[in-house]
Amino acid sequence: AAGVIQSPRHLIKEKRETATLKCYPIPRHDTVYWYQQGPGQDPQFLISFYEKMQSDKGSIPDRFSAQQFSDYHSELNMSSLELGDSALYFCASSYDRGRVYNEQFFGPGTRLTVL
Amino acid sequence: GQQLNQSPQSMFIQEGEDVSMNCTSSSIFNTWLWYKQDPGEGPVLLIALYKAGELTSNGRLTAQFGITRKDSFLNISASIPSDVGIYFCAGQFGGIQGAQKLVFGQGTRLTINP
């Protein structure tokens, strides 16, 4: 079965550079969530989209922005990168069935290293 | 903000032993979830709990949702080497159309000695 695809899998950037992370949800899934997992930490929610509209926002820095496109893929744009942005970034997708809980399927993550 | 307290943080056991870990929260969650994460990979759902007091099994895994909806435990029976990894509990408040963010516990790192 198709899974969530994230690209790139690894990314190395310098401080103050920009980075773009991409997420391709499972076909027919209409919802995307982004999470950040620091070294040895638990995943922290950043932002989510439903049907191409921002739905919820967590602890996402103002330097970050994201959107969901007409084909439902999503991109997380990160500017003025800082050392503390080094982390695993996960995308999860789900299909909204109108239930109070719709299972989120996680991608393999993008490991961002800021030097 | 919301926080889940997960314990223990790490476990070192012998193959074949049973494992138990738990999570508590000051918040009431609509749904409790248990995930397993392998190194360099995304979390994979093991068990989802929807009703207070619910006890659910998935093979050698058993999990229960506390009556108060503020706690949960996960048991693994007869551990095998492929059980090695980090286990996370996660709570979800409910919501619709993209408003179902997960709040994770700190994780339990399981190491198994063959």
Image (tube, grey):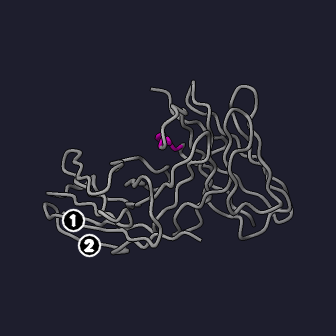
Between tags 2 and 1, which lies in front? 1
Spatial CA span between label 2 and label 1: 10 Å
Is A102 in the magenta? Answer: yes
Residue B71 x %, y %: 35, 66
The residue indicated by pointer 1 is: B19
User: Residue under circle 2?
Assistant: B12
Specify the subunit that label 1 lies on: B
Is residue B22 covered in magenta?
no
Instruction: Work out whether residue B18 or residue B24 is closer to the camera in this orientation and state it.
Output: B24
**What's under tag 1, amino acid-wise?**
Val
Local crowd at mark 1 within 10 Å, few (<14), some, or many (≥20)? some
Chain under numbered label 2: B
Going 51% across and 69% down the picture, which residue do you hit?
Answer: A40
Task: Find residue B106 and report its horizontal and vertical position in percent.
Answer: 46, 69
B42 vs B68: above or below: above
**Which amino acid does the dot numbered 2 rest on?**
Phe
A75 or B52: which is nearer to us?
Answer: B52
Q: Where does residue A61 sit, x and y in percent of width and height? A: 77, 63
Numbered mark located on residue A105 in the image: none
Q: Is residue A56 left or right of residue B112?
A: right
* Point 39% across, 53% down: residue: B33
Q: Quadrant of the C terminus of chain A?
A: bottom right
Q: Quick check: A10 above or below A75? A: below
The residues colored magenta run: A101-106
Q: Secondary structure at mark 2?
A: strand
In the image, residue B8 above or below residue B101: below
For the residues bearing labels 2 and 1, Cβ distance under 8 angstroms: no
Picture quadrant where residue A84 is located: bottom right
Majority secondary structure in the magenta region: loop
Relative image position of residue A6 (x, y in whole percent): 62, 40
Q: Is residue A36 above or below residue B20?
A: above
Identify which residue is drawn at 23% across, 45% down.
Answer: B58
